[in-house]
Amino acid sequence: MTTGEILIVDDTPENLDLLIDILEQHGLAVRVAGTGRRALAAVEASPPDLIMLDINMPGMNGFEVCRSLKADAKSRDIPVVFLSVHDDVREKVAAFKAGGSDYITKPFQAEEVLVRVENQLKIARLQRELTVKGEEALEASRAKSAFLANMSHELRTPLNGILGFVQLLESDNSLSAEQRDRLAVISRSGEHLLGLINDVLSLSKMEAGQAVVHDRPFSLRRMLLGLEEMFRVRAESQGLSFSVEMTPEVPDRVTGDDGKLRQILINLLGNAFKFTTAGSVELRVSWGDGVGYFEVEDTGPGVPVDQRNRIFEPFVQTALGKRSGEGTGLGLTISRNYARLMDGDLQAGGEVGRGATFRCHVALPRDGHAEAPDTVVAQVGHERRPRVGHERIAAVSPDALQQLRVAVIAGDREAALSATGDIARTDPALAETLHEMVRTYRFDDVLDLLQGDPPAETT
């Protein structure tokens, strides 16, 4: 017999005597309470392993007592076995609706009482063990995610340095064609590895509960135009048609996490181009009631209906994705998690054989501090950024500026910070300004500054 402590709640002494005799003979500890209120006080003082509760009692009846127990976090998980002289179905249903775990009718049969009590004690013990195991597994998962996040960060820092030096070497006009080809291999391999590391780092942060939303005002239209510029070259190289369409309602400046939104759209567009060999890729954008709606449609093979939920699970790819040998199967997982962090969601649709359509929506309220378009000083929240003259920008290496521009458009903060280090060799003051903007996620301000505002010295 499973051990445990039983609290019997009944106002009839004969019933108490009989139940005590049955239970104590089998090694169970027993406490008693004659009213509902005394039962609640006894549970508050020392929660038992199981409660046997009479329905018809003076004052609080059994249903009221059970509802009170289930409303209290301290006692809600204690199993309650109802006791009643009625074998009526409606009363049994009412007992289970009140939170009961089982129901025994009077007069009591010793064998039935013992079997039902032992069954409930076993279930309660298994539930406690399952809860402990679940907490241990969750803690282990968090520790694993924290380790991966730290390792990914340590790997990404030197890799950004390698890619930066490759870009510097590529600007050397004395290199032979063979040397340039080898540098291109290093660059492509490094970028691929950096993408994998970034995906693992993003997923690890989400699993460890470290992913947070950095809301700030930014130019949505500028972001979309930047993405169009980024993918235009890829579309031309693949012979595909590519367009970004925005409805008139899409505002210029909104408030949200531009880095996460940019990453979502880059992942979706990247997938569209990866699986589309002929036809077109389209990004359609609309906005309403503080919500941005984004739809990426391609003319690729499409996603089978039975895989449209599974592709959002970590490391899951379609059969075609596995054959391509590209990616980790994390991009869509990260994108959906980012969308949900931003009070939105991401869904897959389309038609097999005609193309895939991914629809995403996120909260993007209009920026309440946006200034008129002809204002020469951009405002972020209540902070105004310094202006930099055209001649300051022109004096910096074009390769360094392009490296920074690409990193900012891609939302890669670490690569952007690395790029500001290259700029520091030419203009330390400008690099310091850019570094602070990147550090505080003011990516649109960086793009504004790189275009060159009316002349004014930074400090």
Image (cartoon, rainbow, N blue to C red):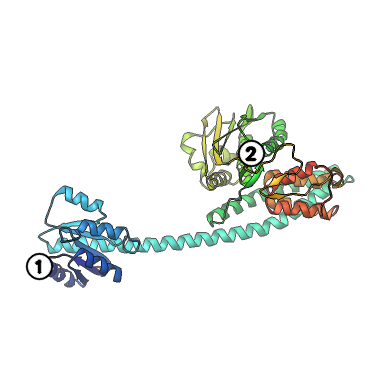
**Place of residue 3 in the rendered image (x, y in percent of width and height, measured from the top left):** 25, 70
Residue 46 shows in this picture: no
SS for dot 1:
helix
Tell me which label, 2 or 1, sits earlier in the chain: 1
Q: CA distance from mark 2 to mark 1?
A: 76 Å
On screen, residue 171 versus residue 156, left or right, reads right
Label 2: few (<14), some (14–19) or many (≥20) C-alpha neighbours in 10 Å: some
On screen, residue 88 versus residue 244, left or right, reads left
222 lies above or below 96: above
- Residue 14, labelled with which disc? 1
**Place of residue 196 in the rendered image (x, y in percent of width and height, measured from the top left):** 63, 49
- Residue 270, labelled with which disc? 2
SS for dot 2:
helix
Residue visible at 48% across and 40% down in the picture: 309
160 lies above or below 356: below
Label 1: few (<14), some (14–19) or many (≥20) C-alpha neighbours in 10 Å: few
On screen, residue 403 versus residue 280, left or right, reads right
**Place of residue 404 in the rendered image (x, y in percent of width and height, measured from the top left):** 76, 47
